[in-house]
Image (cartoon, coloured by chain):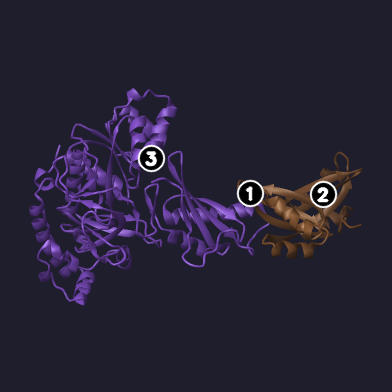
Amino acid sequence: MKIKQLSIFLENKAGRINDMVNVLKDADINMMAFSLAESEEFGIMRIIVSDTERAVDTLKANKFTVSITEVICLKIDDSAGAMAAVLDCLTPNGIFIEYMYAFSQCSSAYVVLRPTDVDGCVEVLKKVDCKFISSFEE
Amino acid sequence: MIWNRAKECMSREDMRLLQGKRLHKIVSHVYHNTPFYRAKMQQMGITPSDIVTIDDIVKLPFTTKQDLRDNYPYGLFAKPMSEIVRLHASSGTTGKPTVVGYTRRDIEIWSEMLARCFSAYGASKDDIFHVAYGYGLFTGGLGIHYGIEELGGTVIPVSSGNTAKQLQLLHDFGPTALCCTPSYALYLADAIEKSGIDKSEFKLKIGIFGAEPWTNAMRKEIERKLNIKAFDIYGLSEIMGPGVSYECSEQCGSHIVEDHFVPEIIDPITLEQLPYGDEGELVFTTVTKEGLPLIRYRTKDLTTLNEEPCKCGRTNVRMSKITGRSDDMLIIRGVNVFPSQVESVILEMEEVEPHYMLTINRINNLDVLTIEVEVSEEFFSDGITKMLELKKRISHRIQSVLGISADIKLVEPQSLERFEGKAKRVVDNRVL
């Protein structure tokens, strides 16, 4: 149902993202999905990786500030209205989205959601028969 | 014009006699009215009768900002509060301000010495003064204000801030003298340029600038941009406020109001008095002040003294421009800032690591303070909003402690330099 996402604090400095992805490369860790949130002077890189625990250890060992956040990953149709259908059942149940990111591939779309209430969100989505992705390594 | 020829052009010998007499009187006064000084003098085994001539000043104990802080708020006042007619305060190093008190006579003396300053700048009662120093606890606004009234000039008490309003008044009210910090003068000059108003529509001719260090290059730039003559005014609230020394038409150092403040230069390490001409820390003894007389107060400002008679006719000792500080105090936008104040804020916030770096730049003629702080691993949040909130919280706290705003920059843990010996947490990129 829920998957673990890593959030990494990055200063807005040229090459800082390179540094981070190279650390993962050297540890042979693959990124399945990521999104970069940015403000004026720092960014937060959110990634979903093949090996969460090892990724945290490796990044920390390389002096990156990392935190783990639970998110929900859904597989939905890559068609008009699919996202609306999901969100429309969340809002009436008092679930708000802090952030989300998505990508689509062939006829499917993958959405990573970070709601205010993760467990509540899972419950709501279960009822409407959503397809959860619990791991990308399928 | 020389406002007080008797005092400003007194022979060196007469001045020393006058200072000696006044020193004896003030030492007796503090000995009997300030427990702090009495205790210090008793410890050193001296009594007021040991202080006869001005040369005896070296026997006296020093006073520091720490002493004022330790006796916060009124401990060093030498008059009962019923005699104190005004308080001013400057920001201290630990959040507590340094409080100074004035009797009615102190205010009169302060005003008179400022009339001397303005006269030395060539101003008179025919001038209109635009006072853009802050009014309030800061000595700049009200101090200068009373001085102008003593001179007989017209005061426009604008205070600081609201540049658009300042421009309007500078244009419409036709002031001939501008009083503010030199960096704000440059800021105003640029604002005038941008406004597109023809410079000939302004009547300014004299600039009275102080409260922060500035260079001769800056002076030339201000003079060119505003088409005025710019003068330096020096002072510190502990001693009196602005007007402790002032430039004359020669602009070859600033004349110290020596009949009220006896200057000395000391070696900041050995604390030995140094001869005139040597660079060292400037020390003042206020020999006429009633409310808060200070004996050998260490300003921490580094300068030299020059006793040569000045071409302007004044004989009062001249001090050169301040070349630095013997402590780590910074003057940012005219406000005294100690790195320890920033440290106290950083240390009380658990969301950040106890490491920080201060950088000061002058951008568009305004000082900009940037404080880098390391985000704590434990408190790092995944949400941008939360991180921005943290930034805002630090920023508010800094503003309330320092009295000026700062740009807060959150940086990665472990990214600021660590120091084994004396930490160097300040980078001042301004050319002062």
Real-space Cα distance between discs 2 and 3?
Answer: 53 Å
Query: Which quadrant is home to the N terminus of chain A?
Result: bottom right
Q: Please, what is the three-letter code of the amino acid marked with disc 2?
A: Val
Q: Residue at x 35, y 56 (%)?
A: B325
Identify which residue is drawn at 8% across, 57% down. B17
Q: Amino acid at mark 1?
A: Lys
The residue carrying mark 2 is A111
Residue B57, percent across and down?
17, 64
Circle 1 residues within 10 Å: few <14, some 14–19, many ≥20: few
Q: Nearer the viewer, residue A42 or B316?
A: B316
User: Chain letter of disc 3?
Assistant: B
Residue B428 drawn at (x, y percent): 45, 51
* Tag 1 near tag 2, CB within 8 Å: no
Chain identifier, colour purple:
B
Q: Is residue A115 visible?
A: no
Which hue belongs to chain A?
A: brown
Q: Give the residue type at disc 3.
A: Tyr
> Mark 3 — residue?
B184
Label 2 marks a residue whose chain is A
Mark 1: secondary structure = loop
Measured in 3D between alpha carbons, the distance from the residue under mark 1 to the one under mark 2, in whole angstroms, is: 29 Å
Circle 2 SS class? strand
Residue A28: percent from the left, percent from the top?
82, 59
**Label 2 environment density (alpha carbons within 10 Å; few <14, some 14–19, many ≥20):** many
Q: Earlier in the sequence, mark 1 or mark 2?
A: 1
Q: Is residue A87 left or right of residue B40?
A: right
What is the total number of numbered labels drawn onto the structure image? 3
Describe the element under mark 3 as helix, strand or loop.
Answer: helix
User: Could you confirm whether marks 2 and 3 are on the same chain?
Assistant: no
Give coordinates of residue B248: x percent, y percent. Answer: 21, 40
| C-alpha separation, residue under disc 1 versus residue under disc 3 | 32 Å
- Residue where numbered disc 1 is placed: A13
